[in-house]
Image: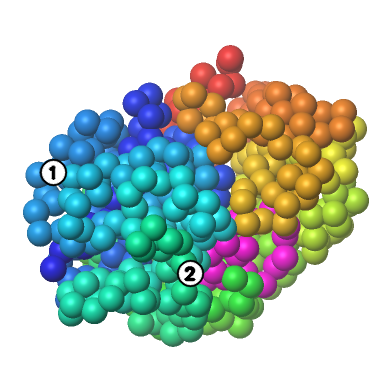
Amino acid sequence: MKVFFVNPSFKADCGRFSRENRSPTVTRSGTLYYPMWLIYAAAVCEKDGFEVEFLDAPARSMDQKQQFGYIKEHGDGTKLFVVNTSTPSIVNDTDCADKLKEMYPDAFVMLVGTHPSALPDETIENSRRIDAVARHEYDYIVRDVARNIRDGNDPYSVNGLTYRKDGKISSNPDMPYITDLDEIPFLSEFVKRHLRYKDYFFAAGRYPEIQMFTGRGCMARCNFCVYPQTMHGHQYRMRSPENVVAELEYISKTFPDVREIVFEDDTFTMKRDRVLEICRLMTEKGLHKRFRWLCNARVNLDLETMKAMKKAGCHLIIPGIESGSQEILNNIRKGTTIKQVHNYVENAKKAGLQVHACYMVGNKGETKETMQETLRLALELDTDTAQFYPLLPFPGTEAYSWAKQNGYLRGGYTDYVKEDGTLNSLLELPGLTGEELVRFCDEARKKYYMRPKYILHRIVMGIKDPSDMKRSIKAFMNIRKYLFK
């Protein structure tokens, strides 16, 4: 029995739309994430004995005509379609699923992702034909639906589903979170069989790269972060260090030209002892000489662990600094302080690690003055790279509830991105318009990257490491039209 997984195309003029990004968009840097959660679910089905077909239309820059042509060519025998979604693309994605049901009326068609997890009933009501949506972590939900279809049992009986049957919408109990993550197949093995890894790009890393997760969930309680609140919860469930390093060894042997590993856990460094063990094993097996790696890391990371990570091949850490205002950090329940931020960046420089700092404007308490505080902090910290985003409050998050209850949201789901697929802002705050938030981010980006000091820094880095120069040029070519606009 065949299960067909589809990451749909999105708009003719923004083919490389990245749903897996925590703020789904066409990124200005050209970064395109692997559709990792869809890949993991497909790998689980394949491990269970199902024939799997996988289409990542954005990675192949397909428009809708090309997408449905591919599906028609490869869809024979499909009994289950699984369609990836995001909030900005949900209307598009629902239309795709409806079209698939029209093309294959005997197949079971379901939507997965953060948006249907947060708004399952609404998602089904806005569809003409889909059978169900999967809520939250969906690897085993998809597998069990496939099993029931294959075995002649009721596919609607699987936990974690919200479904339409006989004209009525119903919801089953939640599917428990997966606790033994070592049972999940390696993402890289599935990529090797089904995807073209050179289609993907991560602006902060060497090219080509492999992205992967070593854990799910996040113990932090940031009010804006979509994955812990809609998909994976706040319990950090981890693969064993041995399992993680076994995948790195597989990548080393199977992808000889891969230069970078991107650990995409919400916070890879949450459990210090585990990080140190992964670093020890990587160093012991010589993997630190084979490729570099980067990860998300909160600003409570200590110097000793940073040094161990550097020794094991880490070159870059990514903190969510968010704001230069302590009041705003408190408002969004970030659980960090400005003092921690300064210590973190200072320690990273001591350890020889680069820092890609993430800043956000538009949170509770934001004013024009606090936005300037954030820009001043960014320039003062002078990290290797930085990004500036307007808050995008997604359904299912506390930030969305706050914005909606206060009447700060303007527009619908399709307004989360502009016509070209790049970031937009729906927020209209007291004294701040959405346009001002977006304009601030654009201007902050220019001020940060067009400094003579920064340009000299990039040239020096490129002379020391030619691969870094190639990465910087590729990222600059993608972002230049936004810098000079």
Q: Amino acid at mark 2?
A: Ser
For disc 1, the marked residue is 72
Q: Amino acid at mark 1?
A: Lys
- Measuring from the top left, give residue 112's x and y in whole percent: 41, 58
Vertical relation: 43 (above or below) 89: below
Where residue 114 sits: x, y (%)? Answer: 51, 56
Q: Seen in the image, is 364 located left or right of residue 382?
A: right
The residue beneath circle 2 is 171
Q: Nearer the viewer, residue 478 or 101?
A: 101
Neighbor class of circle 2 (other Cα within 10 Å; few <14, some 14-19, many 20+) is many
* Label 1: which secondary element: helix
219 falls in the magenta region: yes
Label 1 environment density (alpha carbons within 10 Å; few <14, some 14–19, many ≥20)? few
Q: Which residues are magenta?
A: 212-232
User: Which of these two is toward me, 466 or 371?
Assistant: 371
Can I make out residue 370 in this image? yes
For image coordinates 43% across by 61% down, the residue present is 168
Q: Residue at x 51, y 19 (%)?
A: 481
Closer to the observer: label 1 or label 2? 2
Along the polypeptide, which appears first: circle 1 or circle 2? 1
- Whether the magenta-drawn stretch holds residue 460 is answered as no
The picture places residue 214, in percent across and down from the top left corner, at 47, 71
Mark 2 residue element = strand
In the image: residue 94, left or right of residue 52 = right
Q: Residue at 72%, 28% (x, y): give it.
A: 434
Q: Quadrant of residue 360?
A: top right
**Quadrant of the snapshot with the C terminus:** top right
Q: Does the rendering let one see residue 310?
A: no
Q: Determine whether 129 is above or below 139 in the image.
A: above
The Cα–Cα distance between marks 1 and 2, rounded to whole angstroms, is 31 Å
